Amino acid sequence: MGQRISDLLVPAEKIRHFAEIDLGKLANLPSRRQDLVALSIRIEAAFTSLWNLVLAVIAEDHEDIPLKTLDAVASSLALDFIERYGALAMLSGSILKVLWEAQRPKSENGPKRLREVGQRLAIFAMAGKGINTRQTIGIAFTLCKRSFLTELQQLSRELGASDSDTHRADQMLALVGTEKYPMLRMNLSYLEQFLRCQQVNPYLRAKNEVASERLARYGARGLTIQDGPSMTPDWFFYTWIGWATNKSPRTVRKELQTAETRFKNEINSLSSGYK
């Protein structure tokens, strides 16, 4: 028993490792207990960070929010998180709390909520198999967009200034693999899948890898003269997320632009209903 309890004392280096790991490259759950605990810390930190961003958005318009409103928001956010991470989301203590409340007899919408959990898990699984499944673009995408665009802006300049003969997609993946782009690095596998896809993207009228060339041309403006269309960091992001969620870049842009407004309207509606 003493040895098992000691396994729960996770070394700092393991926590740091799983804090930076690209979850898209995680083929199997770790078998060692300390590794599993460290991974659960990573998942919980991801959800907590998202929850804090959401609370900041709510605080812009509300000083006090009914507890039932916060519970409803947490449940909705948990569903989006499950759709994004699949069964890994269950390693979050906050997610487990939401599901625990949903399964209790006193829960008003428990069965409905748990059915929705199953639906989100199915969406995650189908998307992972390459099945054309439309995924949700919720408030999380909107809140994380700024960080992605900051890194893509810097990445475009670095690509644009490069005189390497290496293919731009390879250059981009190599740069993202460094510590200079933490947000992109944590999503490197999804970026690699996007750029390596051999199907023609109907919105680019070319393979996805052309997006890296066009982003480099955008970053090279004023530095070099290159022929061909460029792509702003915004549109690179919309195209990438559109490919990942099976939606058009324009649809992604529209949904991102309206996600925060829609979210705030939902908060107002819930708060009024619980008064």
Image (cartoon, helix red, strand yellow):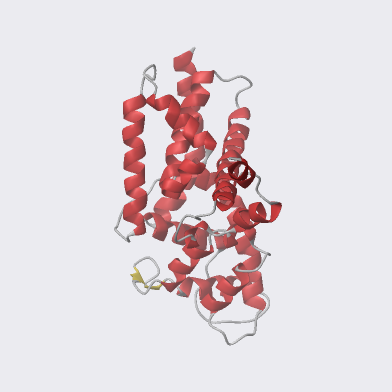
Instruction: Return the x and y of residue 273 as percentages of the image width and height.
Output: 44, 16
For the N terminus, which image quadrant? top right
Vertical placement of residue 158 versus 82, above or below: below
Q: How many marks?
A: 0
Q: Residue at x 61, y 47 (%)?
A: 7
Q: Nearer the viewer, residue 144 or 40?
A: 40
Q: Position of residue 145 (x, y in %)?
A: 56, 51
The residue located at (46%, 75%) in the rendering is 210
**Quarter of image, res 18:** bottom right
Task: Please give left or right for residue 226 compared with residue 138 in the image.
Answer: right
Identify the residue at the far right of this view: 12
Q: Is residue 111 left or right of residue 6?
A: left
The x and y percentages for residue 14 are 64, 55
Q: Residue at x 60, y 51 (%)?
A: 146
Compared to residue 56, the image places residue 220 above or below, namely below
Could one spot residue 84 in this view of the protein?
no
In the orientation shown, which residue stands out farthest toward the bottom?
Answer: 165
Does 273 sit above or below residue 217? Answer: above
Residue shown at the point (66%, 54%) measured from the top left:
16
Tell me where residue 213 appears, x and y as whole percent. 52, 76
